[in-house]
Amino acid sequence: MFDISPTEEVGDFEVKAKFMGVEMEKVPLHFQDLLQLQYEGVAVMKMFDKAKVNVNLLIFLLNKKFYGK
């Protein structure tokens, strides 16, 4: 399970990986980096060296959850 929370900087997020409710890892996520990957045509990126995440769907999720009304 992933828990995504915004940081104090606009466009920066912290992604926490949880397994059975226990926090495993944390990584910073920069929205600008996602947009760069999308521009370069990268469809899937690795997170935590284990999970593969669809870049377009992650951008959609972040837009809907944090920037939509």
Image (cartoon, rainbow, N blue to C red):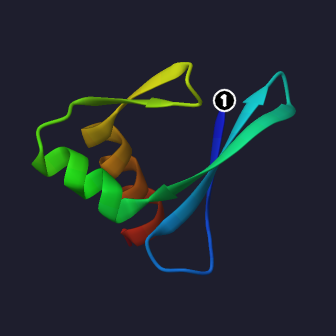
Residue 20 vs 5, above or below: the answer is above
Tell me the quarter of the image containing the N terminus.
Answer: top right
Residue type at mark 1 is Met
Residue 68 vs 10, above or below: the answer is above
Tell me the quarter of the image containing the C terminus.
Answer: bottom left
Frontmost residue, 39 versus 59 = 39
Left or right: where 5 falls relative to 43? right
Left or right: where 58 falls relative to 16? left
**Residue 50 x %, y %:** 56, 19
State which quadrant residue 6 falls in. Answer: bottom right
Identify the residue at image location x=12%, y=44%. Answer: 40
Identify the residue at image location x=32%, y=64%. Answer: 32
State which quadrant residue 31 falls in. Answer: bottom left
State which quadrant residue 17 falls in. Answer: top right
Left or right: where 63 falls relative to 43? right
**Residue 14 x %, y %:** 62, 56
Q: Secondary structure at mark 1?
A: loop
Residue 13 vs 22, above or below: the answer is below
Left or right: where 12 falls relative to 23? left
Identify the residue at image location x=55%, y=61%. Answer: 13
Q: How many marks?
A: 1
- Residue matched to label 1: 1
How many other residues sit within 10 Å of disc 1, few (<14), some (14-19) or many (≥20)? few
**Residue 57 x %, y %:** 31, 39
